[in-house]
Image (cartoon, rainbow, N blue to C red):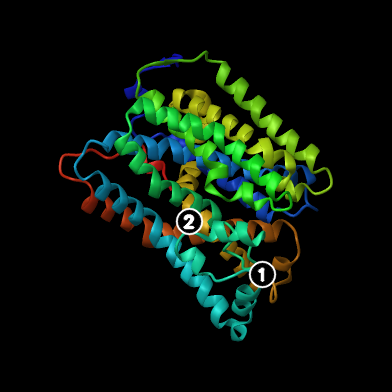
C-alpha cells in the first residue's frame, strides 16, 4: 500500500478494519469482566488493560461522527437527519436495557436492590437522561447493579453527539481543527485540576466528558485532515509510535498499581497522563488501519467471525453484564457455571454473543433499515463509514 492516499480512497465507504478493531476491543472488555485470575495470570493482566479499549472506542467515534457531520453540514436538513439517525441507532437498545435493569431491581425481592441503590448511590433516573456518568463522578462509585456500569462511556459519547454538531455546522474547517487541538491539550489539564481538587475521586478523570475529550478530538482531527487532501506519513512511523505509546500506557498502569492491577484504570498515572497517551496510541493504530485498508497484513481484522462480532459489538457491550447476571443465577443450579473456570468463561462469552445476536436481528438491524429509509433525503448517499459506528 502506498503511504499517500487520496482523501477519497483513504476514508470513504465501509472500513472493515475498523469493525475488526471494535470486535477485538469488545473481547478485551469481556476478558476484563469475565476471565478468572486463577486460569492464566497473563490473560488476566491483558484483561486489566480493558480501559485502553475504551480509548480506542472514543477515537473511533470521534473519527466517524466528525466525518459524517462534515460531509453533511451544508445540507438544509443537517440537524434533523443527524439527530434522527443517531436516535434510531443508539436509543432503542439503550432504553430496552435500562428498562430491564430498572424493572428487575424494582420488583425482585420486594425492591430491596432498588431501595439500596436510591439510598447509597442515587436514582436510576440519571441514566434515563444520559447523565449517569455525572452522578457516578458525584457519588465517587459505580452502582452495585450489574449492567449499569458500562453505560458511562455511552453517556460520554451521547453528550459529545449532542453538542458537537453545532460546532461542525458553524465553524470553518480550520477553526474546527483548532477547537479539537485545544480539546486535546485541555483534557489532561482538566484531569490534573480535578486531581488536585479531589485526589480521592478517580471517577472525575475517568467518566466525565471534559476529562476524556482528547480521544474523541483526536479521532475528529484524523477525519478533518483526510478531508484536506493527501496525507503523506512514513509507512513505519504509525505502528512504531502507536505500539510505543500503548506500551508506555500499559507499563505506567502496571507500575503505578503494582498490587491492584484490577484498579489500573484509576491509577494516578492514568488519571494524569495515561488516558492521553493511550488515546494517542489508539489514534495511531486507527490511522494506520485506515491507510492500510484492504492490505494483506490487516486481513485478520476482516475475517468473517471478527466482522460479525464487530457488527454486534454495541449489543455485546450493553448486554454482557446482563449475561453475567443470568449465568450467576444459573450457577445456583449448575455448579460448573458457578465455579471460576473455562466452562463458566465460555458460557459467559457465548451468552453475551447470543444476547447481542438476538438484539441485532430483532431490534437493531430492522431499525437500521428504518433509519436509512426515513432519515436520508432522496439522492443523498450513505454517510461515510457509518456502518462501523455503534
Disc 2 or 1, which lies upstream in sequence?
A: 2
Disc ID at residue 206: none
Residue most toward the front? 197
Residue 48 visible to an observer of this rendering: no
Please name whichever residue, 20 or 53, is drawn nearer the observer in this view of the structure: 53
Image quarter (top left, top right, bottom left or bottom right) of the N terminus: top left
Q: Secondary structure at mark 1?
A: helix
Contact between labelled residues 1 and 2, with CB atoms less than 8 Å apart: no
The local crowd at label 2, few if under 14, some if 14 to 19, many if 20 or more residues have their Cα within 10 Å, is: many
According to the image, label 1 marks what residue? 328
According to the image, label 2 marks what residue? 315
Please name whichever residue, 275 or 317, is drawn nearer the observer in this view of the structure: 275
Residue most toward the left? 378
Q: Secondary structure at mark 2?
A: helix
Q: Residue at x 63, y 77 (%)?
A: 113
Residue 332 in the image, given as x and y percentages of width and height:
70, 75
Q: Is residue 196 left or right of residue 9?
A: right
Q: Residue at x 23, y 35 (%)?
A: 74
Residue 124 visible to an observer of this rendering: yes
- Image quadrant of residue 382? top left
Residue 267 in the image, given as x and y percentages of width and height:
74, 44
Residue 128 in the image, given as x and y percentages of width and height:
46, 65
Q: Is residue 3 left or right of residue 115?
A: left
Please name whichever residue, 218 or 187, is drawn nearer the observer in this view of the structure: 187
Residue 93 in the image, given as x and y percentages of width and height:
42, 61
Q: Residue at x 43, y 65 (%)?
A: 95
Residue 301, above or below 349 = above
Label 2 to label 1: alpha-carbon separation = 20 Å
Residue most toward the right? 259
Q: Residue at x 74, y 58 (%)?
A: 341
- Image quadrant of residue 25? top right
Amino acid at each position: 500500500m502506498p503511504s499517500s492516499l487520496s482523501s477519497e480512497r483513504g476514508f470513504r465507504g465501509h472500513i472493515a478494519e475498523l469493525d475488526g478493531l471494535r470486535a477485538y476491543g469488545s473481547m478485551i472488555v469481556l476478558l476484563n469482566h469475565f476471565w478468572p485470575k486463577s486460569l492464566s495470570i497473563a490473560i488476566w493482566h491483558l484483561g486489566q488493560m480493558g480501559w485502553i479499549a475504551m480509548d480506542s472506542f472514543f477515537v473511533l467515534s470521534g473519527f466517524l461522527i466528525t466525518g459524517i457531520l462534515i460531509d453533511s453540514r451544508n445540507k438544509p436538513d443537517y440537524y434533523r437527519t443527524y439527530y434522527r439517525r443517531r436516535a434510531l441507532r443508539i436509543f432503542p437498545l439503550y432504553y430496552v436495557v435500562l428498562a430491564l435493569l430498572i424493572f428487575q431491581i424494582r420488583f425482585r425481592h420486594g425492591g430491596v436492590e432498588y431501595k439500596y441503590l436510591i439510598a447509597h448511590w442515587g436514582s436510576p433516573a440519571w441514566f434515563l437522561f444520559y447523565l449517569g456518568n455525572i452522578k457516578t463522578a458525584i457519588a465517587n462509585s459505580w452502582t452495585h447493579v450489574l449492567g449499569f456500569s458500562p453505560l458511562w462511556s455511552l453517556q460520554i459519547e451521547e453528550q459529545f453527539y449532542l453538542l458537537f454538531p453545532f460546532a461542525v455546522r458553524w465553524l470553518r474547517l480550520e477553526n474546527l481543527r483548532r477547537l479539537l487541538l485545544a480539546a486535546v491539550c485541555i483534557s489532561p489539564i482538566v484531569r490534573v485540576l480535578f486531581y488536585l481538587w479531589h485526589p480521592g475521586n478517580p471517577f472525575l478523570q475517568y467518566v466525565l466528558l471534559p476529562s476524556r475529550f482528547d480521544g474523541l478530538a483526536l479521532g475528529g482531527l484524523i477525519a478533518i485532515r483526510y478531508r484536506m487532501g493527501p496525507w503523506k506519513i512514513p509507512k513505519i512511523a504509525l505502528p512504531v509510535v502507536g505500539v510505543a505509546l500503548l506500551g508506555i500506557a500499559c507499563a505506567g498502569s502496571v507500575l503505578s498499581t503494582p498490587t491492584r492491577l484490577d484498579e489500573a484504570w484509576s491509577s494516578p498515572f492514568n488519571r494524569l497522563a495515561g488516558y492521553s497517551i493511550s488515546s494517542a496510541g489508539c489514534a495511531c493504530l486507527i490511522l494506520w488501519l485506515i491507510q492500510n485498508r484492504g492490505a494483506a497484513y490487516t486481513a485478520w481484522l476482516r475475517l468473517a467471525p471478527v466482522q460479525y462480532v464487530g457488527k454486534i459489538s454495541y449489543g455485546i457491550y450493553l448486554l454482557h453484564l446482563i449475561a453475567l447476571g443470568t449465568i450467576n443465577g444459573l450457577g445456583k443450579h449448575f455448579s460448573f457455571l458457578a465455579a471460576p473456570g473455562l466452562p463458566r468463561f465460555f458460557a459467559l462469552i457465548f451468552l453475551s454473543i447470543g444476547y447481542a445476536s438476538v438484539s441485532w436481528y430483532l431490534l437493531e438491524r430492522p431499525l437500521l433499515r428504518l433509519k436509512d429509509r426515513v432519515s436520508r433525503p432522496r439522492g443523498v448517499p450513505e454517510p461515510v463509514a457509518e456502518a462501523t459506528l455503534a
